[in-house]
Image (cartoon, grey):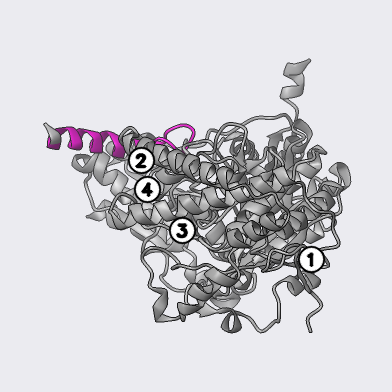
Amino acid sequence: MEATKAQQTRSMTMVQAVNDALRVALEQDETVLLLGEDIGRNGGVFRATDGLQAQFGEERVIDTPLSEAGIVGTAVGLAVSGSKPIVEIQFMGFVYPAYEQIMTHVSRIRMRSLSHYTVPMVIRAPYGAGIRAPEIHSDSMEALFTHMPGIKVVCPSTPTEAKGLLLAALRDPDPVLMMEPLRLYRGEKEDVALNHYETDIGKATKLSEGKDVTLLAWGAMVAVVKKAAAAVAEEGIACDVIDLRTLFPLDKDTIAESVQKTGRAVVVHEAHATGGLGNDLVSVINDTSFLSMRSPIERVTGFDVPVPIGSLEDHYIPSVSRVVEAIHKTVQF
Amino acid sequence: MNRFPLVQSVDQDGKWVSQEEKIEGTLIKSFYRHMLRVRTFDKKAVTLQRQGRLGTYALFEGQEAAQVGSALALKDHDWLFPTYRDHGATLTFGADMVRTFLYWNGRTEGCVPPEGKRIFPPAVPIATQIPHAVGAGMTEKRKGSQAISIAYFGDGATSEGDFHEGLNFGSVFKTPTLFFCQNNGYAISVPIEKQMNSETIAQKADAYGIPGVRVDGNDCVAVYQTVKKAAERARAGEGPTLIEALTWRYGAHTTADDPSKYRDQSISDERRVTTDPLTRLALYMKRERIWDEQWASHIEKELKEEINDAVDKMEAFAKPDINNVFDHVFATPVWPITEQKERYLKHVKGVSS
C-alpha cells in the first residue's frame, strides 16, 4: 500500500512543486510555520503558498507586515524557541533589508553559542531576470550568501528538485537559503512524487554525459546550458552538463570527476561576474584538477552592472550563443 | 507636559511615593544585594581591563536598578535577549559569572547560558535582538506556555529599523514580549536630543497600539513593579509593552572610549550623589528600618569573594580549543571548513614542533 502511494505522482510546474512541498511540511510537523508578505490570503505573489492558509490557518501561514528584517528577525526567535519557520522573501532583490539579520544572527548563532542555540530555518527567495519584472526584482545575489559563513544555499532547476531540496532544507539542522528561479516557476511541467522525499543538499546532478567539455550551471541557467550543449552536439562536441543544485557547499567531487575527464570547463551564471560564484568554481577546479586541464576555464556571466529593466534584460542574461561561443573558445584553445 | 509621567516608587530621598503596595523587606534586601553584586562585578571588570587581564569591556555602572529590577521581575523559564551592556541583567537572571567574564575575554564559552536558563548571546548589532524576542514570544504563545520574552536595548536602538519592525510585529501578533529600553541619554556620543525629536521613547508605543511606560530607571523598586505588571499582562495574553527606563551611565561607552570628549563628566559626579540607584535604595531601607550595617558589610565581603573567585576561575579556565574555530558553524561539517581545518591544524602542528 505504502509502495503504491509512494509512486503516486502529479504533473506540476516548479511553483506547484514548491506549494506541494510546503503542504507536506505543514502536514507532517505542527511546529512548521510559514511567514511572508502576501503569502496567506493571496497565496503569495507567485502562488507558491496558494491555499495553504485556508488549509492550515492564519497561525501557521502568517501574513506578516511588509518588513523583511522583521520577518527574518522574528524567524530567528521562532527557530531558537523550537518552531520551524519557512520564510518567503517575495523577491530576492528584497532581501537586502534582512541581510543584516541573516549575516549577524542567522549565520552565526550556532558558532557563537557553541551549538547551544541553533536557528534551523528555511528562507525561500524567488530570483532572477527574464520575466520582465520591475527594477530590483530580478537580482541573483547568491554570492552574497555563499560568501556568508554558516548558511547553506540551494537552487533547483526542476520541479522535482524544488520539492526535494525544500524538504531537505527544512530537515537540515542549519539555516538554508533556497533560491527559486522565477523564469522556471511556470516553465516545464514534470511528474512529481506526491509523498515526502528529499534531494540531498551538497550533491550536484549530471544531466548529460560528454567527453569534451564540462558545463556547470544552476537554476535558470541550466536550461540555457542544455540548449548550448544540444547546439554544439551537432558539431560533434559532447558536453558533461552539471546542475550544481547546491551552491554552498559545492559538490567538489562531481565537478572534479567531470573536468578531469573532459579537461575543459565553462561556468555559466546569471549573477554578476566579479566576486561571483563562478570564481569559486574556477578555484575548485584549480585545486582539484589543475593537471587535467587542457584549456583555461571560461566564465559566461551577467555583467558587473545592476540587472537592467525589461527592455534590456535579455542582453544581461547569458544567452545560448554566448555559452556556445565560450565552448568553442575552450575547444579551440 | 508629556503623557507618560515618570513612574516612581522611591524618590531620591528614599521616600515611598507610590500608590502601590510596599514590597517586603527580604525582597528589598535582595534588590540591594543584586545591585551591589553587579556593581562590584562591573568595577572589577574595569580594573581587570586596565590591568590587561580582560579585553575591551562595556560598562554599565549607574544602570543597576534598571537591569536588576527588570531581571528580578522575570520567571525562570522566560527568555532574555540582552545587548552587550546587559550583563547586570543576565547575571541577576542566572547567567554564570565565570562565563560572563570569559565573554569579555573573547571566549565563545561566554555565550553559553547555564542549563535551563534561556539567555540569548548578547546582541552586538543595535536593535537586532528585538524581533528575536518577538519570535520567541510567538512560539511560547503558540505552545500556550506562560513564558514571556524580554528584549533589552538602549535609546540609540530606537532609531534603528529593527526596533520599529520588532514593535510592529509584536503588536500585530500580540506576542508576550517586553521591550525594555534603558535610556541613558547617549548613543555613544550622540545625545538623545539629536537622536530623536519625540519627547519620550515611551510615546513611541502609541504608534504600535501598545502600552508605553516611563519609569525611573534608577529606582529598582519602580522598575521591578513596572516590569512585573507588564509581564503579568503579557502572560495573560494581552500583548507587549514598551518600557522606557530613564537612567544614567557614569562611565564610558566601553573601556576603549573617552566620554569627556562629548559629555560633561561632572554630571556623572553629581549624579553619584543625587540619583544613584544603590544610595537611593539604602536610604529607603534605612527609613523603613530594613537596613542592617552588619548585613551590609557581610554581603560586601561575600560578593567580593564571589567575584574574586570567579576571576580566578576565569583565569584558570582551559585554553581556547582551536576546534571551536571550525566545529560549530554547521551541525554536520561541510568540506570547505573540514579542509581548512585539517590544513590549519597541520600547519599549527608544524609551527609548534
Mark 1 to mark 2 CA distance (whole Å):
53 Å
Which subunit holds the residue at mark 3? Answer: A
Residue mark closest to the camera, 3 vs 1: 1
Q: Position of residue A195 (x, y in %)?
A: 72, 29
Mark 4 to mark 2 CA distance (whole Å):
12 Å
- Numbered tag placed on residue A144 in the rendering: 3
Q: Which of marks 4 and 2 is nearer the N terminus?
A: 4
Q: Quadrant of the C terminus of chain B?
A: top left
Q: Position of residue B163 (x, y in %)?
A: 65, 65
Marks 4 and 2 belong to one chain:
yes
Q: Residues within 10 Å of mark 4 (few under 14, many from 20)?
A: few
Mark 3 to mark 4 CA distance (whole Å):
27 Å
For label 4, the residue is: B106
Which subunit holds the residue at mark 1? Answer: B
Residue appearing at x 77%, y 51% in the figure? B228
In terms of depth relative to the viewer, which is nearer, B305 or B282?
A: B282
For label 1, the residue is: B17
Which subunit holds the residue at mark 2? Answer: B
Amino acid at dot 2: Val
Amino acid at dot 4: Gly
Q: Label 4: state its secondary structure.
A: loop
Amino acid at dot 1: Val
Q: Where is residue B306 in the image (x, y as percent from the top left)?
A: 46, 39
Q: In this view, does A192 lie to the left or right of B159?
A: right
Mark 3 to mark 2 CA distance (whole Å):
22 Å
Q: Indicate whether residue B168 is drawn in magenta.
A: no
Q: Give the range drawn in magenta.
A: B327-351
